[in-house]
Amino acid sequence: MRIMIFCFIALFLLPDFSAGQGNPYFNQRDDKYRLLGLKRAKEAFEFSRKEFERQQDLHKKGLLSQAELDRSRVSFSDAEVNYQQSLLAVLFETQFISVERAVKYQSRDGKKHVRLTLINTSGGNAEFQKLVGMEDQLFRSLQPDIIPNIYVSIANTDNSIISQPYEAKIDELRFGHPKDLDFVLLQDLDAVVVNLIYGNGSSRTMKIFLQKDATQNRVIVQSQQFSQEAELGKTATFDLTLELFSGTTNTFALEVVNLPQQLNRYFKDPQTQARLSQFKFLENANTRRAALDVSLPDRPSSEIRMDAPIPFFVLVIPRDRMEEFRTAGARVWTQQEIERLQIGYVKLELVPRGKGRLLVRAQQLYHAIGADGTVRLSVELVNEGTRRLDNVKVEADVPLNWTKRIDPTVIQSLDISEEKRISLEFTPPAGIPPGRYEIRLRTTALSDNQPVNGEDKTITAEVEASTNAFGTIIVVLLILGTIGGIVWYGIKVSRR
C-alpha cells in the first residue's frame, strides 16, 4: 500500500521534467510510446531487483560494505518507482470504445431495429497483459481491461433521440468481449448518430451509415397509401418504398398477384414516369421509390363490385428466383404461402367506388308564344356516371308571377345509363308586355349520399304582342281603296 501511495504521488505531483532528469532509465520518447517505456522500465526494474538481491548476499558474506549496499538499495528503489510510474501511465491511458457493427433489420411485427456491437479498444490492453502476465497486484486491482458504466443512445442529425429504449446501459465492457445492444428505431433512417458516455465522463459521438442484414436476402416493401378508393374509370396510384436487405443480390423484379385480370396495372418510376419491370440498387443507395398504377374499368362486374375491397399483394422477387413466378398472376396466393417464400412483399387494398353523373338533354330551349300562350317542353335526365343517382330533383326559377308545372318533380332513383323524361309547362301572367323572358332549370341528385349537380339549362320564352283582327281588316280596306283610287284617276287622265 505504501508503494501504491508513493506511485500516485510521484505520478501526479512531481514535475515531468524533474522526474525525467533524475531518472537514469527515462527516455524522452517514453511519454509518447508508453507501452515501450513500460517495457523498458520493467526490464530495468527486474535487473535492479536481481542486482540488489546479489548485493545482499555479498553483504551477508562480508564481501560488500554497508554503504555499497545502501547505494544498491537506492538504485533498486528508483527502478521500482520508475516501473510503477510507467505502469500507472498505461493504466490511466484514455479508454476507448468503438462500434464494431451497426446492422439495421426489420422484425416480424414490421418494426425497424438497429443491432449495435460495441467493443473495448482501449490502447495496448493485449500487449500489456503479455508484459505483466496479470501477476502484478496493482494491475489486478485497477482492471484496465474493463470499462464500466457505458450509456448508449441513438439520435438523428438534429440530436433528437430516435431509439427505444431511449438510452441503454452496459455495466462493464471487458476487452475481447463485445456487447450487443438492440434498439427499435422510432424514425426510419439509413444513417444515425451513436452517442456514448462511459468511464469517468468520457464521451464519444459518431455518425454511422447503417449496414443491412445481409442474411435476409430480400427487399422490404412499404406503402403509406396501402388502402385506396378509386372511381370506376379512374386510376389509383400506390406509393412504394423499397429498402434493400441483401448482401448477394441487388437486382429485383416487381410482380402483382391476386388482382383481377380486368384491372390494368403497371409499375413506374415516380420521378421519370418510366415504366418498370425490374430495378437495381446502386452501391451508395439502399432505398428506392416506385409507384403502382391500377386502372379500373368503366363498369362494375362480377369480380369488380362496388364498395367491395379487392386485396392483393406486390412481390419483390430476387433475380435468381424470377422463373418461379412467371405465372404468378394466374393463381390466388394466401399470405401464409407468400411468407413461406421468404421474399419481400406488401399487402394492398383497392376499393372500387362510383359516382353518378347527371346529364340534362333538351331538344329546344327557345319558344315563342303569345301573351296568353304557354311554354311546353320536355327534358331527358340521363345518369352517365358509375353509381346510381337518388332523389333526382328538377327545379325551375321562373320570372315574377309566372306559373310552372313539373311532372314529376322528384325521381326516386336513376340507375347507371338509365334515362327518364320530365314534362315542363310555364305560363306567363295576364297582361304581360311583349319581350324575352328567361327560365333557369336546375337539377340536383345524391350519389352515395354525396350531392351531384347537373348542368343548368336556360329556357328563353319570346312573348309576342297580340293582334286586333277588325283593325287589320280596316287597314287592308283603306289600302285597297287608296290603290283603287289611284288606278281610276290614272285611267281617267289617260282618256283625256
Image: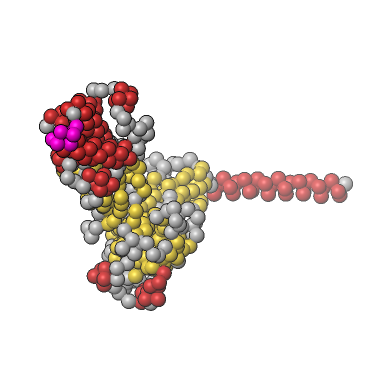
396 drawn magenta: no
Q: Nearer the viewer, residue 246 or 172?
A: 172
Q: Position of residue 246 (x, y in %)?
A: 36, 61
- Which residue corresponds to the image point at 22% horizontal and 31% vertical from the top-left? 72
From the viewer's perspective, is residue 373 above or below residue 201?
below
Q: Nearer the viewer, residue 250 or 450?
A: 250
Q: Position of residue 409 (x, y in %)?
A: 32, 55
Segment tinted magenta in the rendering: 58-64
* Side of 373 relative to 493 (left or right): left
Q: Nearer the viewer, residue 430 or 352?
A: 352
Q: Is residue 113 visible?
A: yes
Q: Position of residue 174 (x, y in %)?
A: 20, 47
> Quarter of the image holding residue 6?
top left
> Quarter of the image holding residue 408?
bottom left
- Which residue corresponds to the image point at 76% horizontal and 46% vertical from the top-left? 486
> Quarter of the image holding residue 302?
bottom left
Which residue appears farthest toward the front when viewing the image? 62
Looking at the figure, which quarter contains the N terminus?
Answer: top left
- Which residue corresponds to the image point at 30% horizontal and 50% vertical from the top-left? 100
Q: Nearer the viewer, residue 140 or 186?
A: 140
